[in-house]
Amino acid sequence: MKLLKDKVALVTGGSRGIGEAIVRRFAENGAHVVFTYRSSAEQAKAIEDACAAEGVKAMAIQSDAASFEQAEALIKTVTEAFGKIDILVNNAGITQDTLMLRMTEEQWDKVMHVNLKSVFNLSKHALRPMMKNRGGSIINMSSIVGITGNAGQANYAASKAGIIGFTKSLAKEMGSRNIRVNAIAPGFIATDMTDSLDEKTRDSYLSNIPLKRFGKATEIADTCVFLGSDLGSYVSGQVISVCGALNT
């Protein structure tokens, strides 16, 4: 059973890591997928081809989610190509980690601009086509750090906490239009970054996770499938922590 059959999904930051897993999982579940990338055109083309092999339409677009104008153009491109947008996943994000005493204004501004303003940009422009389509699902990628905080990540934590407040507010605004808005707060997920950790640091992280393992990008993607499908039709305004009980 393909849970997203014939739905149209847009995923920002979809060329690697969690974003790539979401794009591929959506295609496996029957969704036509548009995803953005910043610079890795070759990788984006490979993902596009893999999705098309699932029998769906796929489109990779180079776009900066933090740009209001590019976000507007992106939504226009998607609606012109597919006629609608059923699912928006705001996944694009960066880190600029350092202690507050060392953090520059530029590091603060850049993280807030990319992580938080991009969510506003894409959501703002996606609302009208979703309203026209009489429904939709917006999924915002927050972080467990946005709930618990973390030393050395004040800018990142603030941006991810801001996404949670944005999610809850927009869910209240758009509920009457059958547009659901939720956030996912991943914990430690196995990525290139965790692969490069030394054994001591890795063991330290794992010791704090009750399930005693890092999560998989596909487990975040599966949560997105649930929220984007009819299985999640009465779930809105929520923050779902996918963290192995790190935050309870």
Image: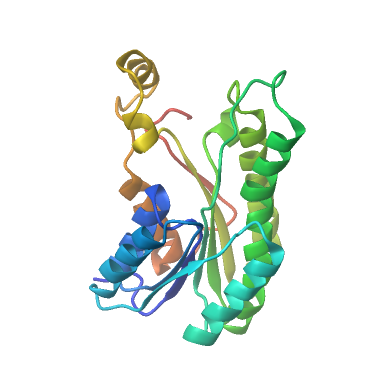
Q: Position of residue 12 (x, y in %)?
A: 51, 60
Q: Quadrant of the N terminus?
A: bottom left
**Count of marks placed on residues:** 0
Residue at x-position 67% and y-position 61%:
67
Depicted 144 relative to depicted 114: above or below? above
**Residue 195 at what x, y percent from top left?**
31, 31
Above or below — where is 215 with respect to 113?
above
Is residue 29 visible from the viewing direction of this image? no
From the viewer's perspective, is residue 40 above or below residue 200? below
Report the side of 75 relative to 19 (left or right).
right
Question: Is residue 42 rendered to the left or right of residue 146?
Answer: left
Residue extending furthest toward the top: 200
Query: Which one is nearer the viewer's eye here, 80 or 64?
Result: 64
Name the image quarter holding residue 211.
top left
Q: Quadrant of residue 53?
A: bottom left
Which residue is at 25% across, 78% downward? 55
How are the residues colored? rainbow
| Camera-side residue of 139 and 70 | 70
Q: Is residue 8 visible?
A: yes
Side of 133 where 54 appears, left or right: left
